[in-house]
Amino acid sequence: MKTSRIFTAMTASLLLLAGCSAPTKEHIKEPVEPVTNTVPELTITGADMQANEWYHEMCDEILQFKSTCIVHTRITNQDVKKALAHLPSDHPEIFWLGKRYSAVTVTDGSKVSLGLLDGLEEDEVPDMAAKLDDKVNEIVAGAPAGSDYDKILYVHDYIADNTTYDHAGAANSDPALCHTSYGCLVDGSAVCEGYSEAFTLIMNALGIESGICTGSNHAWNYVKVDGKYYWLDTTWDDLDSHGNGYQAEHTYFLVNSDMLLRSRNVDWTQGYFPECTSIDENYYVKNGSYFKEYNRDDVISYIESCSDKKHCEFMFADYATYKEALYDLFDDSKVYKASNIDPDTMKYYREDNMFAININF
């Protein structure tokens, strides 16, 4: 996958990210009302793959660092290709496989041969896997003892705060470590696949259901909280270029499908694609910064409550309310009513697709 939130392959109509200094006499640029994309008729393949005994045989052999294995079913190269597509969600700890594979018929079934990532040597993979396992254990040990929400927030922020988006890796179509959980957690450099695999890997270790979905040349996660599914995009919440001290933002933290589909399309083939309708656990809802209507005093009060932070994040429920807030706060400069806003240093960032505003102090 090649998509970061800043350098996206999508059109500007799908994603608008604007970084602005303090307002001037000039009018702000009017936001474009986003279109909510529709989900195509999906082919869900995860359950079918899980039902194949040979798939589990192959995975067990791979996890023992074997590049050649025998499965007791006759399968084709196409079967192996489909299986490898499922590995990131099912086994995000497997980082060492490249794009070479084959399946040939033998007496007992099929012999599957798998190539390593270019540049990796077979004898170094076990030590690398041990490093990844140690890093996961370290992160899990630091997780809060509270709710699943608290643990998910901790992991989301850890990944965003400790990973740099690998733009060079994104420009290269060949498989590389930056596309894996190892690249994200051990090397600290990844593209969206690496972010999403790392998140699911840690969720697995914490016993929280999670998986990976794709679309618009991008990968993100779903996660289950208190019996409900939500979407989460750690890559797009890692906005290093905002200059906010590499602090994670939360625009895509536990959103529903209506919110998610303003910024992307969905690939028609998915391992699993849950129904995400709730915003009960959304970051802004939980933190009192989700506004269903625009009341200037309420928003100013919330901005002032963020005085001890590097930045302030808030979101509006719909386009009309968001637009009203933008013009009042920044075109009419009412944001300066907040006692902690310095016109010389304040910067703000608009997420027009998500009706969200981030202010850096």
Image (tube, rainbow, N blue to C red):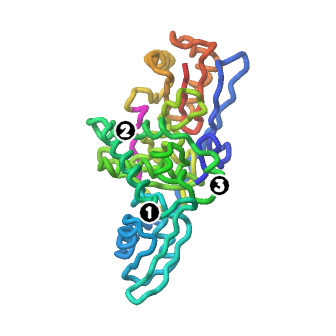
- Residue 97 visible in rendering: yes
Q: Determine the residue positioned at 48% across, 19% down.
A: 303
Label 3 sits on a secondary structure element that is loop
Q: From this viewpoint, which residue is outermost toward the right?
A: 26
Q: Earlier in the sequence, mark 1 or mark 3?
A: 1
Q: Earlier in the sequence, mark 2 or mark 1?
A: 1
Q: Determine the residue positioned at 36% across, 82% down.
A: 72
Residue 92 percent location from the top left of the image: 42, 56
Residue 241 percent location from the top left of the image: 60, 33
260 up-or-down from 78: above or below: above
Q: What is the quadrant of the C terminus in the image?
A: top right
* Mark carried by residue 87: 1
Closer to us: 342 or 264? 342
Q: Are marks 1 and 3 in contact (CB under 8 Å)?
A: no
Question: Where is mark 2, residue-wise?
Answer: 281
Label 2 sits on a secondary structure element that is loop
Which amino acid does the dot numbered 1 rest on? Answer: Leu
Q: From this viewpoint, which residue is outermost toward the left?
A: 145
* Mark carried by residue 172: 3
Which amino acid does the dot numbered 3 rest on? Answer: Asn
Left or right, 279 with reference to 114 = left
Q: What is the quadrant of the N terminus in the image?
A: bottom right
Residue 180 percent location from the top left of the image: 49, 53
92 up-or-down from 12: above or below: below
Closest to the camera, between mark 1 and mark 3, is: 3
* Mark carried by residue 162: none
Left or right, 224 with reference to 68 = left
Q: Are marks 2 and 1 in contact (CB under 8 Å)?
A: no
Q: Are marks 3 and 2 in contact (CB under 8 Å)?
A: no
Closer to us: 210 or 116? 116
